[in-house]
Image (cartoon, rainbow, N blue to C red):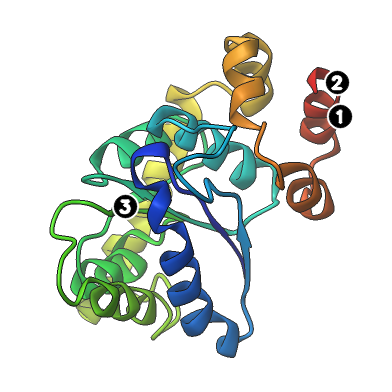
Amino acid sequence: MKIALINENSQAAKNEIIEKTLRGVVEPLGHEVFNYGMYSAEDEAQLTYVQVGLLTAILINSGAADLVITGCGTGEGAMLAANSFPNVLCGHVVDPTDAYQFTQVNNGNAIALPFAKGWGWGAELNLQYVFEKLFVSEWGLGYPRERAVPEQRNKKILDEVKKITHHDMMTILKNIDQDFLKETIAGPKFKDLFFANCKCSEIADYLKSIM
């Protein structure tokens, strides 16, 4: 699995510890981590939580990432922004129980964490346990298990609803404020990470054309 990490500007200073914790959990399982920043609060390329949502959608819709790990101060803004885009199903994950139930019940492709609220003594342990619970079992098996069939049915219904209520990604990329889009993909490592992993030539070609 290709896992992308994205931090917005208010919590960029924690990028290093989040990346280290994430890699420590998922790389022994055979997953890859791609850190899209922000890497520090002083980065020239700044990301708001709305841009985090757009970048999440670009990565998911292009196939450059299978799962996005992101967040903001409370995690709420990043979650709402990500879910405003097509084909992104982002859960708000505070603790390991949230992480496990999101994988089993909702079977989404992004999580938003609170990187300020409740971030105190032992925060890195909670982060580690959250990441561990994301991968403790195959996703989409249901919780409790006897609820698996209706939960899987509801997930498919939600996916179909989102197809109706959202524009396709190319329509969004062409109609969204182009300066906002350019700022979103201005990170220093974006080109190297994204184009090497992107599976959608249409999205890749369009982003190259505006750079």
Residue labelled with disc 1 = 205
Is 9 located above or below residue 131 in the figure?
above
Crowd around label 3: few <14 · some 14–19 · many ≥20 (10 Å): many
According to the image, label 3 marks what residue?
Answer: 91
What secondary structure is marked by label 1? helix
Amino acid, disc 2: Ser
Quadrant hosting residue 44: top right
Which percent across, then down, holds residue 177?
Answer: 58, 9
Q: Which residue is mark 2?
A: 209
Disc 1: CA contacts within 10 A as few (<14), some (14-19) or many (>=20)? few
Quadrant into which the N terminus falls: bottom right
- The residue under the point 24% across, 41% down is 76
Residues under numbered marks 1 and 2 in contact, where contact means CB atoms less than 8 Å apart: yes
* Residue type at the position of mark 3: Gly
What distance separates the C-alpha of mark 2 from that of mark 3? 32 Å
Q: How many marks?
A: 3
Residue 147 in view in this figure: no
Q: Earlier in the sequence, mark 3 or mark 1?
A: 3
Tell which of 195 and 36 is nearer to you.
36
